[in-house]
Image (cartoon, rainbow, N blue to C red):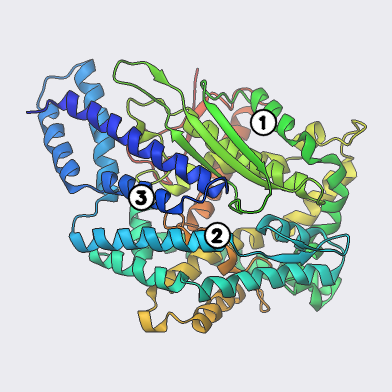
Amino acid sequence: MESARTFFERLNRDYLEVHETKENLFWSTYMGTSDDHAGFARAEQAYKDFISDPALLAETRRQLAAVEAEPAGAERDALLHGLKGWLALFESNIVDNDEARVLMRELIEAEADLFARRKELLLEHVNEQGETEEASLSMLATNLAMNPDETARKSSLAAYRRLERWVLDNGFLDIVRLRNRFARALGYRDYFDYKVRKNENMSPEQLFVILDDFEAATRDANRCALEALAADKGEDALAPWNLRFHMNGDVLRRMDPYLPFGKGLQRWVDSFRRLGIAFRGATMQLDLLERRGKYQNGFCHGPMPSHFDDRGRWVPGRINFTAEAKPDQAGSGWRALNTLFHEGGHAAHFANVTQNSPCFSQEFAPTSMAYAETQSMFCDSLLEDADWLKRYARDAAGAAMPDELIRARIESRQPFMALEERSIAVVAYFERALYQLDDAALQPEAVLALARDSEARIQGLAQGAPRPILAIPHLLNQEAAAAYHGYLLAHMAVYQTRAFFLRQYSYLTDNPAIGPCWPSTTGVRATASTTTPRCAG
């Protein structure tokens, strides 16, 4: 009979094989350097089969019980810790019946097909030069926020809404039905119920106690900000093609010379280094520029999870992350910098997971999405700090951003903080309602009406949002679907983390004490509540 030590080492070895194969194909297909979508689907299925295997779960429980019966000691305790990590991973991903396994295979194939066809969809808008050009989602968002020409901004919104129609007419609703069937085969009410319990270790009811409290607390602030904008700029300022521009478009244009794309990478490296953020020898592959066929949203994945191997040797991470920058577009440097800090924050997080198994160093269940996003969103929050802007935002001649412009940025952004956070919350309200619909009600017009109603009710935008819900790419991928609330929970943790550091040190920018801090968690089961920083020394 296989010993607990041998079984543990086999789990680590086999996981690395299926994980790395899947992640390498994920990168090449999502970056548009490969069209092997079928190969990626097979690799994704092999990975899912491994982490959802009932036999592996049963054997992990048996081996864990045997180790727990042994006398305490360093080697036994380390093995116990590692097996508990595997137990958490298997329990949160278990697919324990044949019907659900068949449905999971169908889901993976359907999503791979939708992804491949989505890459062929070309969206266009009118740029600042008055030219019609092919546009990524990042380019559409930047044009809506920065282009002074209203007709051009309308073209970007029209492209977003064309994408919505395409999503509704090309298989997304069939995937929603499949996701619900899969979740119900596992005993859940629907896919939203399944994902919240799996990702955040709470029920939807527990989640919406938090979200409903947030919604009530921010409702008046959001309404007042929109009313003030309409009074100042006219009711038409609230139109979805005008809102972002009238909120702060002029200020962002004035900031643009101080935040060029060409300096973004250096400013990210310098800022992280001065914060004391290190990557423990990780190899990072960055793909930062917009191009046709590339996935249109930033992300960070680690083909090689950082860990100590069975002989106690450090295995550094291998990490890929991407951005969608178009250097010749106004505002692209600011967006790229945000992505560098956000995805770079993820990279720093997962490069520094110092456990004895690769199962601990991954951002999906049993790791809470809210937890996984906290460090990345803390890092990108630094970019809005006046002292960071004063130190790093400089024009081509080296002149610092003027104090007046920094103040204008704060004054233009602050009134709309409630709207920004509610623009995250709206996705959770929409997705919960979406997955509660029965199959017959999942029709394009009904779902589109649900999206517009959600935007009006939560964001206060009667004409719809500048970024339509159904154009958000997270909805199309099963790992990110029904999980967007994790960003809002993470923001709550970010504000707490910032408050901690400010109380402790009184400043954040270039504070070398921040990097050596890490969240207080064993890594076995991370939840949104385990984000209180603990500092070395």
> What is the three-letter code of the residue carrying label 2?
Pro
Residue 122 badge: none
- The answer to which quarter of the image holds residue 296 is bottom right
Residue 42 badge: 3
Which residue in the protein does label 1 denote? 506
**Element under disc 1:** loop
Q: CA distance from mark 1 to mark 3?
A: 51 Å
Upstream in sequence: badge 2 or badge 3: 3
Question: Viewed as shown, does residue 87 lie left or right of 474?
Answer: left
> What is the three-letter code of the residue carrying label 3?
Arg
Q: CA distance from mark 1 to mark 2?
A: 38 Å
Q: CA distance from mark 2 to mark 3?
A: 22 Å
Upstream in sequence: badge 1 or badge 2: 2
**Element under disc 2:** helix
* Residue sitting nearer the eye, 459 or 115: 115
The reply to whether callout 1 and callout 3 are in contact (CB within 8 Å) is no
- Quarter of the N terminus within the rendering: top left
* Residue name at image x 53 percent, y 54 percent: 488
Which residue in the protein does label 2 denote? 473
* Residue name at image x 87 percent, y 63 percent: 148
